[in-house]
Image (tube, helix red, strand yellow):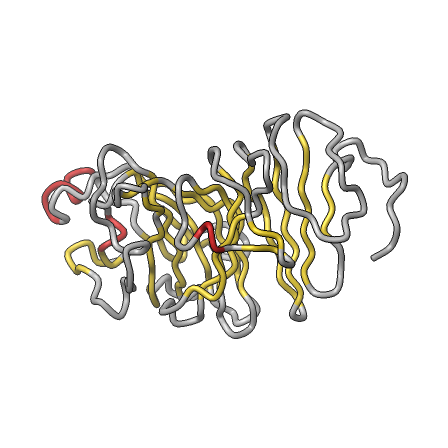
Amino acid sequence: FIRAYTALLDSVVWTNYQWEPSVLVNTQNNSVSDSRGYRVTIGPDGQLYYAGFSDGGNTTYRFDPQDPARQLASDELISFDNYNTSFGLSGARSLNHHARYDPATGAIDRIQITLTRLSSGGGNSINVRGIAADPAGRIYMVGQAFATIANRDAQSLAGQPVGPYQGGELHLLIVSPDFQMRDTWTVFTADGGSQGSTGRAIAVRDGAIAFAADIGNSTAQMLTVAPLQAARTATDDVYLVVQKGARIFAGDFEGGTTAGWTAP
C-alpha cells in the first residue's frame, strides 16, 4: 500500500493498492505475487517516486492503483526489452517496480519493472533500496542485483572493467524521464568478487550523484577511483561514491574516523 496523509496526520488523503485478497484473486485474475514497498521520495519536479518489489510477475502492479479492475495501458506500464518484461520466471523471483505518481491524488503516471537474466535466459532477482529523482524526472536507483544485469561484462569504471560475477552485487540504475531508456545500468564489482554488496541510499543535486552501499563479505572487492582509502579494513564495510569531480573511497567509515582522509 501507499498512503498520503494530511499535514496534521489526522486523516488519509488517498490510498493506492491495499486491496482485499478477494480483489487480487477475482478482479485481478489471481495477481497474488507477494509485493512490498521499500522507498518513496518527492522529486524536485514535485512528483512522487516509488520503489518496491514483487515475488513474480503475476502482480497487482499491472493494474491501476486506484481502480483494481483497470489493467494499465502500454504507455503506463512501460517495457521495451527482456529486462523490463516479466517472462521466463521460475519460482518466486523478486522483480523491482519503480513508479511515478501525482502526490496530490495518487494517480499513476507510469510504472516499470526491472529484472535480471540468467545465462539460460530465465528471469532472476533484483532489488532497489535507494531512489532519487532530478528536476527533469530522471530516476536514480541503487540496490542489489543477481546474475545478471544487461551487458554486465561490458561495464567499466574509469577504464577499469568490472570483475566476474560471484553473487548479489551493488547496482546503479538510471532511467530516463519517460521510462523508455536506461541511461546507466552498472555494477561496481572488482576482481575478487563483490558478493554481498547492496546499495542503500542515493541522492542527486546540482548535477552530482552520491550513493552509499554496504559490503557484508570480507572477501568482496569494489572498484575505486582516486580513493581516499583504497584498502578495506573491516569485515562489514561501507562503500561511498560521489560522481562529478569528487572522489570514490571505501572503508573506515563505520568507525566514525576521518584519519588519513583528504578533501576532494
Instruction: Please name whichever residue, 23 or 55, is drawn nearer the observer in this view of the structure.
Output: 55
Q: Residue 231 or 197: which is nearer the viewer?
A: 231
Q: From the viewer's perspective, tell me whether residue 105 is left or right of residue 59.
A: right
Q: What's the residue at 53%, 32% (across, down)?
A: 196
Marker count (numbered): 0
Task: Please state the horizontal and vertical placement of residue 55, each as a whole percent of the image.
Answer: 30, 38
Q: Position of residue 56 (x, y in %)?
A: 26, 41
Q: Residue shown at 24%/50% (left/top)?
A: 86
User: Residue drawn at (39%, 68%), measured in percent from left and top?
Assistant: 181
> Residue 203 lies in what quarter of the image?
bottom right
Q: Where residue 166 sits: x, y (%)?
A: 48, 33
Report the side of 197 relative to 84 (left or right). right
Q: Residue furthest bottom?
A: 136
Q: Is residue 117 above or below residue 236?
A: below
- Where's residue 184, x and y in %? 49, 61
Residue drawn at point x = 76 percent, y = 29 percent:
233
Q: From what the image shows, is residue 197 above or below residue 116? A: above
Q: Nearer the viewer, residue 255 or 43?
A: 255
Looking at the image, residue 220 lies above or below residue 82: above
Q: Quadrant of residue 210?
A: bottom right
Q: Quadrant of the C terminus?
A: bottom right
Is residue 263 found left or right of 71 in the rendered image? Answer: right
